[in-house]
Amino acid sequence: KESALDMVHWLKEKGVEYRLIKLSQNAYTVDDVVRYSEENVDPAEICKTLILRGKKTGKKIAILLRGGDRLSFSDMKKMLGEEMTVANEEQVKEAAGVEPGAVCPFLVNVPLFVDKRVMDLKRMNCGSGDHLYGLEFETKDLARVVNFKIVGMAKSRTDS
């Protein structure tokens, strides 16, 4: 796929060390990534990039979370002043150039918000722009090559 190839070329240009992880089929959840990965992946390092849309303005943003975390929509509303909803397939394609499930934080063309819990990871594994590949890199490299705002918008599955 062109987007994954473009992204790999772009990462090389930026000097980001990465590993592409081949998946045997499309992965949409952390469990899918672990199940379909053809190499070992650490489930704690798996992250997801969600595209959200403002219910009033239609403004789109991307948020990067650890795979096991959930987004606090009430915290998002407080921070952004607007109720947000998960974007539909067409809106995800507009904001990220790819279908849901393949979104890569390096490829989004909307403001990127990164949950502070992601920054605790030494390495992360996320979408690459291609459903059949995951992308693993050192978390510090994200800040080197893309602009984002660190926010506290996640709760783990065990938080109340």
Image (cartoon, helix red, strand yellow):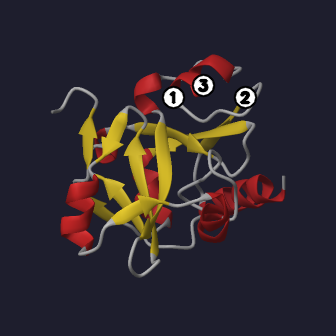
Circle nearer the viewer, 3 or 2: 3
Kind of residue indicated by mark 1:
Val
Residue depicted at 51% across the width and 28% down the height: 30
Q: Secondary structure at mark 1?
A: helix
Q: Secondary structure at mark 2?
A: loop
Most extreme residue toward the left is 160
Residue depicted at 63% across the width and 50% down the height: 100
User: What is the CA distance from the residue labelled 1 to the residue labelled 2?
Assistant: 12 Å
Tag 2: Cα neighbours inside 10 Å, few (<14), some, or many (≥20)?
Answer: many
**Residue ID for mark 2:** 23
Cβ atoms under marks 1 and 2 closer than 8 Å: no
The correct choice, above or below, for 24 with respect to 73 in the image is: above
From the viewer's perspective, tell me whether residue 17 is left or right of residue 86: right
Tag 3: Cα neighbours inside 10 Å, few (<14), some, or many (≥20)?
Answer: some
Residue depicted at 26% across the width and 62% down the height: 76
Kind of residue indicated by mark 3:
Asp
Residue depicted at 21% across the width and 69% down the height: 79
The correct choice, above or below, for 50 with respect to 117 in the image is: below
**Mark 1 or mark 2, which has the lower sequence index?**
2
Nearer the observer, 94 or 12: 94
Most extreme residue toward the front is 56
**Residue ID for mark 3:** 32
**Mark 3 or mark 2, which has the lower sequence index?**
2
Residue 30: which disc?
1
Kind of residue indicated by mark 2:
Leu
| Residue 88: image location, x then y, percent | 58, 59
User: What is the CA distance from the residue labelled 3 to the residue labelled 1?
Assistant: 5 Å
Q: Answer with the quarter of the image where residue 41 lies.
A: top right
Query: Can you say which quadrant of the picture contains the C terminus?
Result: top left
